[in-house]
């Protein structure tokens, strides 16, 4: 068990070192561009995982947070006349916007389940997209531009890479903390049988709401990063109907219900689809190719490319805990008629 | 001896079907009580009403002299009434020990949201949970997914995870249903033991008459949603109305009691 | 004002009928098979393009062309079910079907884009602008015929579901798939045919949509979000509910457009959210038809 933990931490360190060195080794901006966008989606995928992966409520309205984070930054930068790197100080604003939007959104959507939940999230998404098109302060269909950053291409992409990496690592740490805590366990109990969990004293609405707010915060934060990286946002790119489907695709591709799967799916799918766009021979075929790859994975690796998916993570998690020694006074064999452990005093008799 | 759990005149209709029609039951503290009746007589509905999964159309549920009618399931559970389900309702994609921990945390009152992220409280619960798993004999499976347990093992897990929250009354819906004879004996032993050593109060619904008669001090018979008779096993065994209820009760001319909601107050003790 | 309002309501009802036709296929697939067919929007566009090609290349009138396009779409539907959907298993099946149909939709969209390009087209037979003059209102014949076909096909689906042996099997599966299997219903076959029927009606829906709207390969996204919200509002699996919800949606949109064209659809989505809070199972949905 010690060796396992060591190997796991060692692997994580190697991965992190690789992630940190990546833009140094591949300094070509078009390569780091893949890295930045892949990390943006990895962060959003982890944000999705924290709520949907744990609770089983398939949310298809994450673009609401993503777009709102982008617009919050753009509007604030414009109206407060922020310049250059000072704009990064607005990232917390993006994050808070996500959390605040999650409250009314959650209060409406989290009252319904399954298919109805999916459609309510889609409906709310379209309301937001229309607001971005039609409000007086959002710049209409041409959207918003960001202030100018006078960085050369190489450091530009590299700096954004590190910002996105920090967001991704932060999101992963939060997701990991949630997963191992009592909060995470309550979320997963809701996924299995919400009514029964409530019957056992889980405050389902509060718990779901908290997870939804965390998810919204992370997604809106990375939406702000994405906006400043691309220098622009339009209603159809910030509130993109394909955003959520892409996220869900990444997660199912990597492995639904696990952090590693969510990240892995994003890190593979996003660069892949960007790369497909650059191949002249595939010009016009990239949708078909992407759809075909997706179909192959779904049909032949239905649980994602992390083959044992959720169970694998469960195993790791339970191994990480201190070994459980059955109380010595209690006979192991059921036929030995052990005396009943005191139910009220935590086992001490 | 005080009455811990009591219902008065519970009625509940689904569309045109009268599932409960004045059902009354009284469970004395520290006893094992049974609830029997033919299929469709309203036993599980009565359980659902008591534990808050269904709201009665009329009537009152009293627990420790406090009305709990219409409270939400979690409130009922927190008040001290635990239950199992006829078709077990465990969390299939959580491990066995995680199932136990979900039930155990019901007692905790985390002071703030940050406490949700803490793990200290688990250590204490974990030890207790493992003891209970050992008590029902499935501690070897603590780290497997609950969904992979056999039917009988799920029954045991459900019993254990109701116990972990230390309820004052435990409602068991067909604990012996669909379980092999060895396991039935073990379940009966465990119930008897909890009752004898810790004075736990039980109310159980069961079709296995041998099981009920051997275990319960008091038995209440339900028919068409109403209480027919209530008393010690000997009294129940020899009561003609019970036989009628089980045989379909078309003896109204000779003996109208089976058709009317007559509550017999004799407790047999 | 009253005149504008009446005209808007009439338009809303007529167009609503056409949306109902597209939504009936979705509600059937959704309610019976527990499949979220994200490709339905793209399939409507495929149906529209089929009619478009038959009309422009072979000079077959779009209404006559339905005799070809409906069976063609049925075969496509059965093929999609056989090739992909019937192969999915497990606890996340519903979410998986969402992704699989999304992938199928992406592929179809990519092919349409490759074949027809990105320009908007419209099916324009000679009678496209002719209109009937009823009680002082001008109503396009296209809308009237579209509505008639929609009501006829929705009625046909209703009869199929509630008056035939096949429909009994479908409803048995809707209520309890495992039990249906036990009493000897070939669930896979019924599911494939149901999926085929659900897709086949998009041929007619697409034809009318293509006559009344300019479209391209991307038009499927706006459609699918509307269709999904229609069937949820109507209550999943409810044919009449889909009709009612579609008419409600399009009438509301068309009425709000008189005052506020930009916010028309937002008003509908807001109404949808409010109604669902009040009735989570939709307007005509039975509560918990399908247990968790």
Image (spheres, coloured by chain):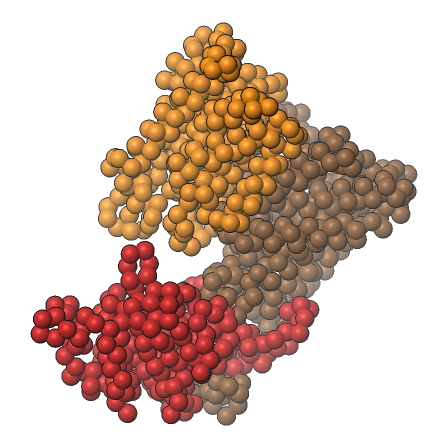
Q: Name the residue located 38 percent from the left edge and 31 percent from the top edge.
A: C196
Which tint was used for chain B?
red
Above or below, C161 relative to B119:
above
Q: Name the residue located 47 percent from the left edge and 90 percent from the top edge.
A: A329
Residue C158 location, quadrant: top left
Residue C124's x, y, as percent?
52, 11
Above or below, B22 relative to C87:
below
Q: Name the residue located 52 percent from the left edge and 33 percent from the top edge.
A: C249
Residue B42's x, y, as percent?
29, 68
Q: Is residue C216 visible?
A: yes
Closer to the camera in the image, C50 or A201: A201
Closer to the camera in the image, C136 or A28: C136
- The quarter of the rendered structure image containing the N terminus of chain A is bottom right
Residue B240's x, y, as percent?
14, 79
Side of A235 relative to B221 (left or right): right
Closer to the camera in the image, A191 or C268: C268
Above or below, C34 relative to A306:
above
Q: Name the residue located 49 percent from the left edge and 77 percent from the top edge.
A: B79
Which tint was used for chain A?
brown
Residue B156's x, y, as percent?
39, 75
Side of B234 relative to C290 (left or right): left
Which tint was used for chain C?
orange
């Amino acid at each position: 068990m010690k060796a396992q933990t060591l190997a796991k931490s060692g692997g994580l360190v190697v991965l992190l070192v690789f992630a940190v060195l990546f833009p140094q080794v591949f300094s070509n901006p078009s390569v780091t561009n893949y890295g930045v966008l892949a990390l943006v989606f990895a962060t959003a995928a982890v944000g999705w995982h924290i709520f949907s992966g744990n609770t089983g409520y398939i949310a298809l309205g994450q673009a609401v947070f993503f777009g709102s984070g982008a617009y919050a930054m753009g509007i604030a930068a414009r109206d407060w006349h922020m310049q250059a790197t000072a704009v990064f100080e607005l990232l917390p604003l993006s994050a808070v916007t996500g959390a605040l939007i999650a409250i009314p959104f959650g209060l409406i959507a989290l009252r319904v389940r399954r298919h109805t939940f999916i459609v309510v999230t889609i409906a709310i998404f379209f309301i937001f997209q229309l607001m971005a098109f039609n409000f007086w302060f959002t710049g209409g269909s041409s959207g918003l531009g960001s202030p100018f950053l006078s960085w050369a291409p190489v450091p530009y992409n590299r700096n954004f890479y590190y910002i996105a990496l920090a967001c991704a690592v932060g999101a992963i740490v939060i997701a990991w903390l949630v997963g191992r805590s009592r909060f995470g366990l309550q979320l997963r109990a809701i996924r299995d049988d919400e009514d029964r969990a409530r019957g056992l004293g889980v405050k389902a609405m509060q718990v779901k709401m908290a997870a939804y707010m965390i998810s919204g915060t992370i997604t809106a934060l990375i939406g702000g990063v994405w906006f400043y990286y691309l220098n622009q946002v339009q209603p159809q790119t910030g509130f993109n109907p394909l955003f959520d489907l892409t996220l869900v695709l990444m997660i199912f591709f990597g492995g639904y219900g696990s952090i590693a799967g969510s990240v892995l799916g994003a890190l593979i799918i996003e660069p892949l689809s960007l790369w497909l766009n650059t191949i002249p021979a595939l010009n016009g075929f990239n949708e078909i190719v992407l759809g075909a790859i997706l179909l192959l994975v779904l049909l032949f690796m239905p649980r994602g490319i992390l083959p044992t998916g959720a169970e694998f993570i469960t195993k790791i998690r339970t191994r990480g805990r201190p070994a459980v020694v059955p109380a010595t006074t209690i006979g192991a064999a059921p036929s030995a008629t052990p005396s009943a452990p005191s139910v009220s005093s935590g086992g001490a008799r | 001896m005080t009455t811990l759990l009591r219902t008065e005149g519970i009625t509940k209709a689904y569309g045109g079907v009268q599932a409960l029609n004045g059902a009354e039951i009284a469970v004395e503290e520290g006893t094992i009580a049974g609830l029997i009746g033919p299929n469709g007589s309203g036993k599980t509905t009565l359980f659902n009403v008591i534990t808050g999964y269904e709201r009665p159309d009329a009537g009152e549920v009293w627990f420790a002299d406090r009305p709990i009618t219409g409270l939400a399931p979690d409130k009922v559970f927190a008040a001290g009434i635990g239950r199992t389900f006829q078709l077990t309702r465990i969390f299939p994609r959580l491990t066995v020990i995680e199932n136990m921990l979900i039930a155990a945390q019901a007692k905790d009152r985390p002071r703030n949201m940050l406490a949700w992220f803490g793990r200290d409280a688990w250590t204490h619960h974990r030890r207790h949970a493992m003891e209970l798993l050992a008590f029902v004999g499935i501690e070897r499976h603590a780290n497997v997914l609950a969904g992979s347990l056999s039917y009988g093992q799920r029954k045991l897990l459900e019993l254990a995870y109701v116990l972990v929250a230390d309820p004052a009354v435990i409602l068991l819906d067909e604990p012996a249903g669909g379980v092999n004879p060895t396991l039935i004996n073990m379940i009966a032993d465990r119930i008897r033991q909890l009752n004898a050593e810790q004075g736990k109060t039980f109310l159980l619904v069961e079709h296995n008459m041998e099981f009920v008669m051997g275990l319960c001090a008091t038995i209440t018979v339900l028919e068409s949603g109403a209480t027919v008779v209530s008393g010690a096993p000997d009294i129940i065994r020899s009561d003609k109305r019970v036989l009628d209820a089980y045989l379909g009760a078309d003896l109204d001319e000779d003996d109208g009691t089976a058709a009317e909601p007559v509550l017999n107050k004799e407790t047999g003790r | 004002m009253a005149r504008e309002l009446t005209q808007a309501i009439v338009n809303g009802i007529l167009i609503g009928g056409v949306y109902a036709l597209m939504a009936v296929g979705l509600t059937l697939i959704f309610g019976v098979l527990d499949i979220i067919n994200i490709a339905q929007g793209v399939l409507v566009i495929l149906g529209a393009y089929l009619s478009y090609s038959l009309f422009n290349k072979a000079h077959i009138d779009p209404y006559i062309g339905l005799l070809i396009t409906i069976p063609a779409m049925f075969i496509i539907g059965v093929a999609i079910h056989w090739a992909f959907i019937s192969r999915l298993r497990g606890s996340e099946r519903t979410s998986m079907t969402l992704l699989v149909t999304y992938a199928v939709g992406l592929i179809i969209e990519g092919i349409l884009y490759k074949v027809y390009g990105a320009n908007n087209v419209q099916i324009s037979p000679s009678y496209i602008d002719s209109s009937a003059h009823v009680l002082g209102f001008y109503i396009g014949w296209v809308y009237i015929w579209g509505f008639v076909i929609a009501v006829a096909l929705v009625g046909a689906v209703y009869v199929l579901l509630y008056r035939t042996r096949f429909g009994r099997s479908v409803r048995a599966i809707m209520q309890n798939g495992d039990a249906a299997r036990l009493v000897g219903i070939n669930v896979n076959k019924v599911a494939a045919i149901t999926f085929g029927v659900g897709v086949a009606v998009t041929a007619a829906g697409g034809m009318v949509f293509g006559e009344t709207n300019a479209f391209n390969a991307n038009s499927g996204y706006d459609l699918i979000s509307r269709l999904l919200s229609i069937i949820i509002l109507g209550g999943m699996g409810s044919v009449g509910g889909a009709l009612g919800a579609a008419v409600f949606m399009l009438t509301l949109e068309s009425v709000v457009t008189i005052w506020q064209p930009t916010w028309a659809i937002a008003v509908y989505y807001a109404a949808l959210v409010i109604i669902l809070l009040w009735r989570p199972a939709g307007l005509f949905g039975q509560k918990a038809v399908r247990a968790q």
